[in-house]
Image (cartoon, rainbow, N blue to C red):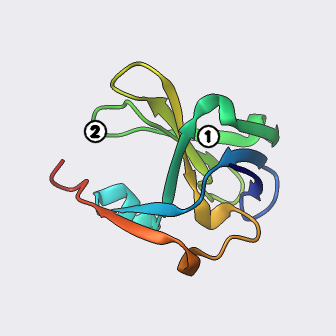
Amino acid sequence: MALYKGSCHCGRVAFAVDADLQQAIECNCSHCSRKGYLLTFVPRASLDVLRGEENLSTYTFNTHTIQHRFCATCGCAPFGEGRKPTGEATAAINIRCLEDVDPSQLEIISVDGRNF
């Protein structure tokens, strides 16, 4: 585990997250594929919004179980929040919004969210 810092494009939303970044998930669902997300999942307690909580908007679709959070100013979507089937609060971190992370150095796991 390591501490990573990230933000939206304009910097109004900033966060820190404790994560093990050996791999990332690339989902082909209609939302993730259009946004180009590369995701890692962590317990919600591992995500700390450092500033800009008031600048975050939320988008939900389909089953409305995931709150896709995005900056109301620049539209960048750094993370989502939801619950695992077990009820545990979780966060999906868009690794493309993390500082000093090179996605080409990670194992990318394809997930068929389109047919899930």
State the image quarter where residue 101 is shown: bottom right
Q: Residues within 10 Å of mark 1 (few under 14, many from 20)?
A: some
Q: Is mark 2 on a helix, strand or loop?
A: loop
State the image quarter where residue 102 is shown: bottom right
Residue 46, percent from left and from top: 67, 36
Image marks 1 and 2: residues in contact by CB distance under 8 Å? no
The dot on residue 57 is 1
Residue highlighted by disc 2: 62
Q: Is mark 1 on a helix, strand or loop?
A: strand
Q: Answer above or below: position of 30 versus 67.
A: below
Q: Nearer the viewer, residue 60 or 44?
A: 44
Residue at x 59%, y 54% (from the top left corner): 77
Residue 66, percent from left and from top: 43, 35
Amino acid on which disc 1 is placed: Ser
Residue 69, percent from left and from top: 58, 43
Looking at the image, residue 30 sits to the left or right of residue 73; the answer is: left
Amino acid on which disc 2 is placed: Asn
Looking at the image, residue 105 sits to the left or right of residue 13; the answer is: left
The alpha-carbon separation of the residues under discs 1 and 2 comes to: 17 Å
